[in-house]
């Protein structure tokens, strides 16, 4: 098995998608969607990041072991954010006796 | 007649280190090593993003009005500049894979020019913030100041009846400078790496069989791009709908 060479056509397609998504996130930000503004902005950012990781960084064509490394990194980040927020957001739920 | 082990390897495959079985195994090891490093980078920036998320959820009004004082147009242009630089870097990797030395050098230099453009625009933005006294420091000669514009004060009233706390606005700027500053530092390191790659490419060090330095530096450059993909909406766009 030799090295997978990603074609230039795919690079240009991903580039176009990234530019379009950047314009979309910029335009949507000006519309008042309340709490959904943050959700939309982050969803677009996650899509853009995933495109870069899969195609520009060749993970889509890499070995399963590479997938495990990449997945573990972002999984641990998710643990850090979820558990910390779980703590901060529930602090007011219990009244501690003075 | 005696031949050393190293000679045998040089004869079979150029650029294969003696402790690897074949080129494929060497490439796989390099990719995994680079990703192990990038995972530590995910954790490093992750800590800053976590601090941002916590303070933003605690002080949404202050973060929105402070975010509105940033230059969104420049942030938007810089996002496009970085995406272009990721494309030129990806094409550089492509030309190292097919063994086209002159186009490899051309695209590495284009990537450097775009990286420098990003840093210059960032510098102009930093200067704007410095002039507005938005740098969160308290020296005798320079102090952080916050005077909300009329539109921002209106936006703040709509979101909450609570008055804007200057200290919390300062916290936004602290995070802004810490996150974009560390990101810019990564860009500067990236420019150093690209300079090294150009010099190596000029000496003909890369072949279709051996171009790991180009490939792995590409991973680094794209990672720095991803960090900015998250920084742009989080720092520049959170208060845009209040304008």
Image (cartoon, coloured by chain):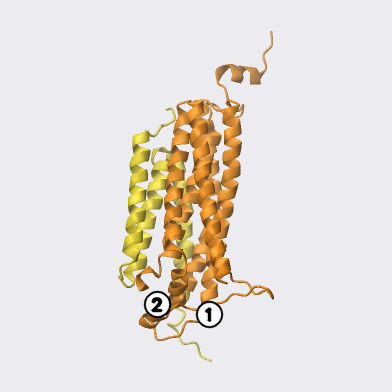
Q: Is residue B179 visible?
A: no
Q: Which mark is residue B151?
A: 2
Chain under label 2? B
Hue used for the chain lettered B: orange
First in sequence: mark 1 vs mark 2: 2
**Location of residue B139 with respect to A28 vertically, above or below:** below
Q: Secondary structure at mark 2?
A: helix
Q: Position of residue B161 (x, y in %)?
A: 40, 86
Q: Is residue B144 visible?
A: yes
Position of residue A16 in the picture relative to residue B210 (left or right)? left
Q: Position of residue B92 (x, y in %)?
A: 47, 35
Kindly indicate which chain is depicted in yellow in the rendered structure: A
Q: Quadrant of residue A93?
A: bottom left
**Location of residue A2 with respect to B153 vertically, above or below:** above
Q: Which residue is mark 1?
A: B166
**Considering depth in this image, is B71 or B61 the residue closer to the camera?**
B71
Q: Quadrant of residue B2?
A: top right
Position of residue B122 in the picture relative to residue B151 (left or right)? right
For the residues carrying marks 1 and 2, which lies nearer the camera in this image?
2
Q: Position of residue B227 (x, y in %)?
A: 48, 54
Labels 1 and 2 touching (C-beta < 8 A): no
């Amino acid at each position: 098995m030799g090295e997978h060479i990603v074609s230039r056509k795919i690079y240009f397609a991903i580039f176009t998608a990234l530019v379009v998504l950047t314009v979309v996130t910029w335009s949507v930000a000006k519309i008042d969607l309340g709490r959904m503004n943050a959700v939309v902005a982050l969803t677009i950012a996650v899509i853009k990041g995933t495109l870069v990781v899969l195609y520009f960084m060749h993970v889509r064509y890499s070995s399963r072991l590479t997938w495990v490394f990449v997945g573990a990194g972002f999984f641990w980040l998710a643990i850090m954010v979820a558990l910390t927020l779980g703590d901060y957001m529930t602090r007011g739920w219990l009244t501690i006796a003075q | 007649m005696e031949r050393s082990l190293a000679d045998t390897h040089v004869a079979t495959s150029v650029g294969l280190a003696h402790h690897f079985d074949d080129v494929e195994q060497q490439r796989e090891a390099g990719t995994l090593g680079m990703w192990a490093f990038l995972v530590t980078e995910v954790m490093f920036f992750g800590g800053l993003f976590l601090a941002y998320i916590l303070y933003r959820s605690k002080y949404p009004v202050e973060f929105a009005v402070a975010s509105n004082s940033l230059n969104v147009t420049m942030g938007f242009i810089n996002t496009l500049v970085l995406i272009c630089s990721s494309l030129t870097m990806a094409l550089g990797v492509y030309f190292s894979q097919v063994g086209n030395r002159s186009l490899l050098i051309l695209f590495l230099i284009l990537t450097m020019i775009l990286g420098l453009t990003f840093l210059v625009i960032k510098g102009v933005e930093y200067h704007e913030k410095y002039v507005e006294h938005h740098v969160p420091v308290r020296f005798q000669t320079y102090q952080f100041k916050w005077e909300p514009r009329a539109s921002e004060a209106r936006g703040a009233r709509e979101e909450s009846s609570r008055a804007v706390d200057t200290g919390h606005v300062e916290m936004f700027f602290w995070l802004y400078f810490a996150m974009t500053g560390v990101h810019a530092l990564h860009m500067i390191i990236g420019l150093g790496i690209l300079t090294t790659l150009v010099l190596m490419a000029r000496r003909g060090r890369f072949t279709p069989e051996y171009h790991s330095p180009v490939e792995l530096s590409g991973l680094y450059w794209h990672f720095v791009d991803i960090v900015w993909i998250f920084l742009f909406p989080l720092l520049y766009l959170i208060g845009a709908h209040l304008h």
